[in-house]
Image (spheres, rainbow, N blue to C red):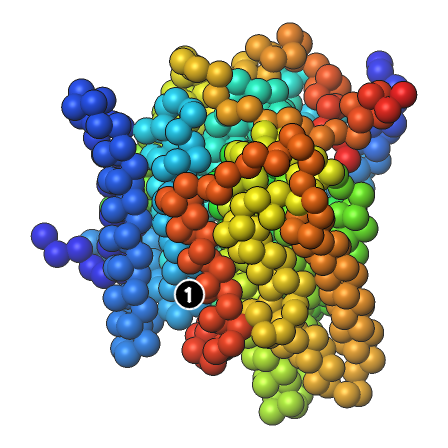
């Protein structure tokens, strides 16, 4: 197993979250069921009551397709040139 | 087919986004590549015009709602709601998007794949406007995700350099986990009430019909604040921002700092104030404490930066701290003084008005600053402040606008930032017997003075020093890059001198959170 | 008497925490993305578990999960594209190599 500060921090975070979630889960386990309105089955429900969600999800798929196309495009020129000022590089140059 | 006014901006932006790659193919055939840029700008203009119509329709006839078809809300239908707060935020998002699109025509010339850039910019603004207009919590999440996917890609758009790609990956991981935490909160609230509609959740939780203990509801509140707080760059969830904003192309940095992080604040405020009435749930204290923590940590980090865009990125985090503190004042006043509403409500309205006004001021000011620094970097090919000293003397229009932006955010009267900061600070002092609020207000004043010091220091370095020989030959930016910069600088000055109209807009927007 | 939906809800909450641990502590970027997908699926399971108390699962919960699976797939696609670009620059999928941006 790898040791290191990141793993210990991650483990502490997880333990704290587990405590909180356990406290919460025992709360919700005591909740009584609510009365739901009668809803049509899924195949009708999705396209009628939740139609707006499905349409916008279609546009998400389009945006993801544009994103993947943009990230895998072939560059023709050198593109933009920018220097970045980073502390560690500056220290190395100073020495 | 008549499209209702409420969905017109979304339909315009999304259809323009889908058509842009096709127009690009046409343009490449006709050897006139700029057609797609003009098409995208036309899409933004049409959406902005329709939002102005929507604003006048709402102020005359009250809030508007829209349901697809006839499927009613109680049975689980999706509802879009536009009230004065939504259209206020949507106008800011679309306006900054329009100016960034005009700026990108020349700035992004050196890149390829620009049809996808404009398509993603259009879906980014469409997602933000959708978040502002949604009345259903899960629908808000869906629009939120379209905004997030567009913004992850736009940060990493210049993928031929290592910096945007590294920053984009970190941003993606942190922001996705945040969105999923918010979705987890939605599932908890669904588990208690059986609905995800914001208004229905609010009635069910405030009437006490459901068998949920306050502990579990506070757990949901905590998840909502954490989940949306990652995108709103609240400390300690802010670590993605100082890497992502400098690495993105400057036009996208202006969008990110100006409007995307404000969407996080908006989603947090809308969901908290609507579902959990501030009179029964105390989240004002938490928002105030995190607001102060955000301001202080980011102020201290901003001093140590040598990269101009990284300094501006930390300053964005500071301003989110002001906005969160203002919102926190409003919630705190309503929680702790709920027995005397005649005292608490005006203070809350005042604080929320200051926060909403600051959202506008920071969007305009930070957009202006990032666009100007984009011009500087475009000419000087470096982001290092010691290298950029004095460049404002060679690029006079850009340099002057940059200084106006810095002075406005520093809170120098009579520019716009002065008013919004003043309102937030005065709101903290409005309840004389509450010493906690006064203490927080004093911390806001101290942070504001501290921030003004490094803004003025940056003005001095960019404008008043002698330029180094390397950048002595810098020429002024082209006109299409200067146009949005000059417009934003003019807006800053005009709002500072005549804040009345904006104050009434911000106040009615703030009132929506309390009453509607 | 512990009902089935309570077990599913508790398991889903535990799986969210496992997913967050995966995102926080793994060195390989691919494992981080898998952690994100674990969180997505677990939140979906939570929706379904909490919606199943009336005998049949509530169609509202089902439609939310269907849409969120599609969204999760799109986020994974974008994340993997960025990861491949990182590999092209750094030559490795080790998250600890992405330390050039510090202050």
- Note whether B37 is above or below B447 in the view shown: above
Q: How far across and down, in percent of the image, does residue B496 sit?
A: 53, 73
Q: Check the residue under mark 1 and report the chain it is in.
A: B
Q: Residue furthest left?
A: B1
At horizontal 61% and vertical 36% (from top left) the residue drawn is B472
Please give the residue where the numbered disc 1 appears in the rendered image: B88
At horizontal 57% and vertical 51% (from top left) the residue drawn is B399
Q: Camera-side residue: A45 or B489?
A: B489
- Note whether A56 is above or below B109 in the view shown: below
Tell me the quadrant of the picture where the N terminus of chain C can be found: top right
Q: Residue furthest top?
A: C91
**Residue C75 can be seen in this image:** no
- Note whether A92 is above or below A85 in the view shown: above
Q: How far across and down, in percent of the image, does residue B397 sit?
A: 50, 52
The answer to which quarter of the image holds residue B88 is: bottom left
Q: Camera-side residue: B250 or B318?
A: B250
The answer to which quarter of the image holds residue B311 is: top right
Tell me the quadrant of the picture where the C terminus of chain C can be found: top right
Left or right: residue B151 compared with residue B57 = right
**Residue B88 can be seen in this image:** yes
Q: How far across and down, in percent of the image, does residue B287 sit?
A: 69, 62
């Amino acid at each position: 197993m790898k040791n290191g500060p990141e793993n210990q921090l991650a483990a502490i975070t997880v333990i704290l979250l587990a405590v909180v979630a356990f406290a919460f889960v025992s709360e919700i386990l005591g909740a009584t069921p609510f009365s739901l309105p009668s809803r049509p089955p899924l195949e009708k429900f999705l396209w009628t009551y939740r139609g707006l969600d499905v349409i916008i999800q279609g546009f998400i798929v389009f945006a993801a397709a544009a994103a993947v196309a943009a990230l895998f495009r072939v560059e023709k020129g050198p593109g933009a040139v920018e220097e970045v000022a980073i502390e560690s590089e500056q220290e190395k140059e100073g020495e | 087919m008549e499209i209702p006014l409420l969905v017109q901006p979304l339909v315009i932006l999304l259809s323009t986004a889908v058509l842009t790659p096709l127009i690009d193919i046409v343009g490449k055939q006709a050897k006139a590549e700029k057609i797609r840029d003009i098409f995208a700008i036309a899409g933004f203009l049409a959406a902005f015009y329709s939002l102005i119509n929507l604003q006048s329709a709402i102020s005359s006839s009250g809030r508007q709602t829209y349901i697809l078809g006839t499927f009613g809300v109680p049975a689980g239908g999706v509802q879009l709601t536009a009230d004065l707060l939504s259209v206020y935020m949507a106008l800011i998002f679309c306006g900054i998007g329009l100016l960034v699109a005009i700026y990108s025509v020349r700035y992004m010339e050196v890149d390829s794949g620009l049809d996808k850039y404009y398509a993603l910019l259009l879906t980014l603004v469409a997602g933000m406007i959708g978040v502002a207009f949604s009345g259903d919590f899960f629908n808000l999440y869906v629009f939120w995700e379209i905004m997030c996917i567009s913004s992850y890609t736009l940060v990493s758009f210049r993928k031929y350099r290592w910096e945007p790609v590294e920053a984009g990956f970190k941003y993606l991981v942190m922001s996705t986990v945040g969105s999923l935490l918010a979705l987890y909160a939605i599932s908890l609230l669904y588990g208690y009430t059986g609905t995800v509609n914001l208004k229905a959740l609010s009635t069910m939780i405030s009437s006490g019909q459901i068998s949920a203990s306050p502990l579990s509801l506070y757990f949901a509140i905590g998840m909502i604040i954490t989940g949306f707080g990652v995108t709103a760059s609240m400390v300690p969830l802010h670590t993605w921002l100082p890497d992502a904003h400098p690495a993105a192309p400057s036009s996208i940095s202006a969008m990110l700092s100006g409007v995307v992080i404000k969407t996080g604040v908006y989603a947090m405020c809308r969901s908290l104030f609507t579902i959990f009435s501030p009179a029964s749930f105390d989240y004002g204290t938490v928002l105030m404490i995190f607001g102060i923590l955000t301001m202080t940590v980011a102020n201290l980090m901003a001093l140590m930066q040598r990269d101009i865009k990284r300094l501006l990125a930390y300053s964005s985090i500071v301003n989110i701290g002001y906005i969160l503190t203002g919102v926190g004042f409003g919630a705190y006043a309503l929680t702790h003084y709920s027995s005397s509403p005649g005292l608490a409500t005006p203070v809350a309205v005042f604080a929320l008005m200051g926060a909403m006004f600051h959202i506008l001021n920071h969007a305009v000011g930070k957009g202006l600053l990032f666009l100007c620094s984009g011009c500087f970097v475009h000419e000087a090919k470096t982001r290092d402040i010691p290298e950029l000293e004095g460049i404002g003397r060679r690029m006079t229009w850009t340099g002057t606008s940059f200084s106006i932006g810095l002075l406005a955010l520093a809170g120098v009267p009579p520019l716009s930032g002065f008013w919004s900061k003043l309102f937030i600070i005065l709101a903290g002092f409005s309840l004389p017997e509450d010493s906690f609020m006064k203490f927080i207000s004093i911390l806001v004043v101290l942070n504001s003075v501290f921030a003004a010091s490094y803004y003025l220091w940056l003005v001095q370095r960019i404008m008043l020093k002698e330029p180094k020989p390397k950048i002595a030959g810098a020429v002024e930016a082209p006109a299409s890059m200067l146009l949005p910069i000059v417009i934003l600088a003019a807006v800053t000055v005009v709002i500072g001198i005549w804040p009345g109209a904006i104050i009434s807009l911000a106040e009615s927007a703030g009132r929506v959170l309390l009453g509607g | 008497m512990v009902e089935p939906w309570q077990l599913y809800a508790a398991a889903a909450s535990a799986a969210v925490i496992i997913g967050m641990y995966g995102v926080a502590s793994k060195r390989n970027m691919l494992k981080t993305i898998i952690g994100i997908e674990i969180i997505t699926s677990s939140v979906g399971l939570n929706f379904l578990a909490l919606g199943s108390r009336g005998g049949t699962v509530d169609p509202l919960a089902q439609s939310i999960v269907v849409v969120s699976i599609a969204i999760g797939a799109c986020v994974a696609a974008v994340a993997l594209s960025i990861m491949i670009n990182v590999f092209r620059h750094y030559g490795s999928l080790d998250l600890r190599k992405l330390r050039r941006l510090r202050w």
